[in-house]
Image (spheres, grey):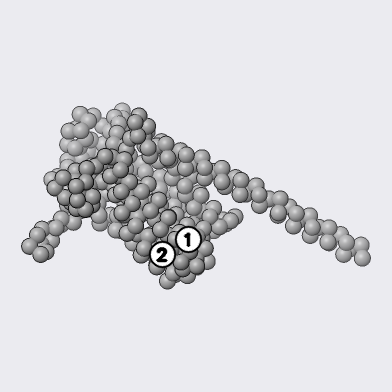
Amino acid sequence: MTYDVTIFGIDITLKPIAFSLSLFGRQWDVYWYGILIALGFFLAIVYGWTNAKRFGIDKDKMLDVVLVAAPVAIFCARLYYVIFDGVKCESIADFFGFGESSGVAGIAIYGAVIGAFVSGGLMCKLKKIKITDMFDLGALGFLIGQGIGRWGNFVNQEAYGSFTNSSFWGMESNKTIADMGEGLVHPCFLYESIWCILGFFIIHKLSKKRKFSGEVFLMYCAWYGFGRGFIEILRTDSLMWGNIKISCLLAFLLCAASVTAIIVIRNKMKPEKEYVSVFSENMEEENETD
């Protein structure tokens, strides 16, 4: 299967399958989507390894957490998709998307995030790592992975939006025409990729002056939630709960809750700093009087 795509006025032919392997008497297709996800995961690990010390985390313990959280995240990403997209599963093979009646082998990023942070939190407890420090480091890794992984959606010609009048960034392919009809559509994968990569550089810089443990994680939730909420409005393949776009609702709630948490925590820290400052000034005055 190939896709003839036009984006930025450039014609491209995409092949979702990168290459195939013959093993155990069966042909296994290796998709660009999986390669790009793996690349994003690898770069996230590299970032975590080189920055773990700055967050007060032992590198070896960090890897222990990742080795458990990664497969759990993949499982939860698929589970989330199966539940909210109504995928019928008659076997374990169907659940993982390679059975005969499995339908679309999709995953959902929210399931991955939830699974990663819940399992990662439990591993932090076990390994005696401060959970909020690990979440701060992991959040930046997620932005790297999401920014790169979204290009897998481009290769698969999925995660696009409604029609757009822009001839510059609008996208059209034989896939979008078959699904939507002729016309340029919003390349939502591109919007989210840019949003995540931009967020990584901004939050990485801010992380060097974080005010409290867990602040970077809350920044990630606020940043990603805000962008994803608006991007989800444009998408046509959203997981639905009645007439509500689940990802859109969760994104804005996540953003609002995270911003509120940052404000509340920072406000609680101010009185303590002011008290210390006033106390120090009074001590200096007393010393001068003596």
Q: Residue at x 17, y 36 (%)?
A: 174
Q: Residue at x 43, y 40 (%)?
A: 251
Q: Name the mark on residue 287.
A: none
Q: Residue at x 58, y 56 (%)?
A: 212
Depth check: 286 or 250 in front? Answer: 250
For mark 1, give the secondary structure: helix
Above or below, 1 against 65 in this view is above
| Residue picked out by circle 2 | 65
Name the amino acid type tagged 1: Met
Looking at the image, tell me whether mark 1 or mark 2 is earlier in sequence order.
Answer: 2
Depth check: 164 or 25 in front? Answer: 25
For mark 2, give the secondary structure: helix
Judge whether residue 151 can be spotted in this image.
no
Above or below, 62 against 74 in this view is below
Q: In the image, residue 274 lies at what x, y percent?
A: 73, 52
Quarter of the picture containing the N terminus is top left
For the view shown, which residue lies furthest in the right direction? 290
Q: Residue at x 46, y 38 (%)?
A: 252
Name the amino acid type tagged 2: Val
Judge whether residue 243 can be spotted in this image.
yes
Depth check: 103 or 141 in front? Answer: 103
The reply to whether discs 1 and 2 touch (Cβ–Cβ < 8 Å) is: yes
Q: In the image, residue 95 lies at what x, y percent?
A: 23, 50
For the view shown, which residue lies furthest in the left direction? 25
| Residue picked out by circle 1 | 134
